[in-house]
Amino acid sequence: MDRSAVILVGGEAKRANGLEKYFFTFGGKTFIERLTDTLAEVVDEIILVAKDPAQCSRFSHLDNVRCVTDIRRGYGPIGGLHAGALAAKGDALFVCACDMPCVSTQVVESLFSLLEGYDAVIPQWATDMIEPLHAVYRRSALLSALESHESLSLRRMVKGIRTRYVDVAGIRELDPELRTFININKIEDLGKLS
């Protein structure tokens, strides 16, 4: 089964005071370089979903990455998922946000391995706390669910497909500090990474 990664880069950066989080640096690389380098080890293609062509042009320096733009504008992450799923060639998609610089290849590989028989594999902290933007989806199911999905709610979409929830406690075996889930919303949060 071909695998694609869909990285959502099109947010408005409101919490980052307008700064582009994907160009924050950690360990000598930008967040987007760290993510694309990591995910290249476990997927066949990487797709960035931006809000418009001008934002796409910001990533022209990255090799082996395609950038597409939202088709359904104003839908937030749901719109990004839709555009990414349409553009993807793989039937299994790992989806994440651009502000997660420590995504673990072992965790992503594990999520892919659990997809058989499901439409999505989503880490879960508690009943109402899930990680839909650090998850694996079946492309066909995602496209079907998003075809007429009018809500901005990822949770509502996830409830409408066959979802396998994976307890975050089990993920600790692969990533003891659960760094794979760290997301950085503002430059002051970079201290979380040390």
Image (cartoon, rainbow, N blue to C red):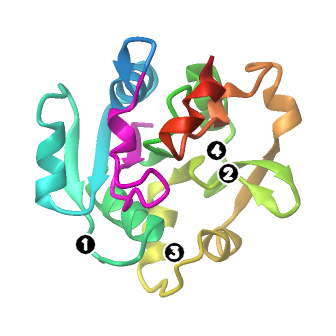
Q: Dot 2: within a 10 Å radius of its alpha carbon, few (fewer than 14), some, or many (20 or more) residues?
A: some
Residue depicted at x 67% and y 70%: 155
Q: Is label 1 or label 4 in front?
A: 1
- Asked whether residue 169 is in view, the answer is yes
Where's residue 127, x and y in %?
88, 61
The amino acid pointed to by label 1 is Ile
Q: Horizontally, is 54 left or right of 170 in the view?
A: left
Q: Position of residue 133 (x, y in %)?
A: 57, 51
**Magenta-tinted stretch:** 1-25
Question: Are the residues tagged 2 and 3 within 8 Å (C-beta)?
Answer: no
Which residue position is annotated with label 4?
115
Q: Secondary structure at mark 1?
A: loop
Q: Which residue is mark 2?
A: 131
Give the image location of residue 26, x and y in percent: 45, 20
Residue 145's mark? Answer: 3
Q: Of label 2 and label 3, which has the lower sequence position?
A: 2
Q: Which residue is mark 1?
A: 71
Residue 90 visible, this angle: no
Residue visible at 35% across and 55% down?
A: 18
Q: Residues within 10 Å of mark 1 (few under 14, many from 20)?
A: some
Image position of 96 with respect to 71: above or below: above
Classify mark 3: helix, strand or loop: helix
Disc nearer the start of the sequence (4/3):
4
Identify the element where label 2 is drawn: loop
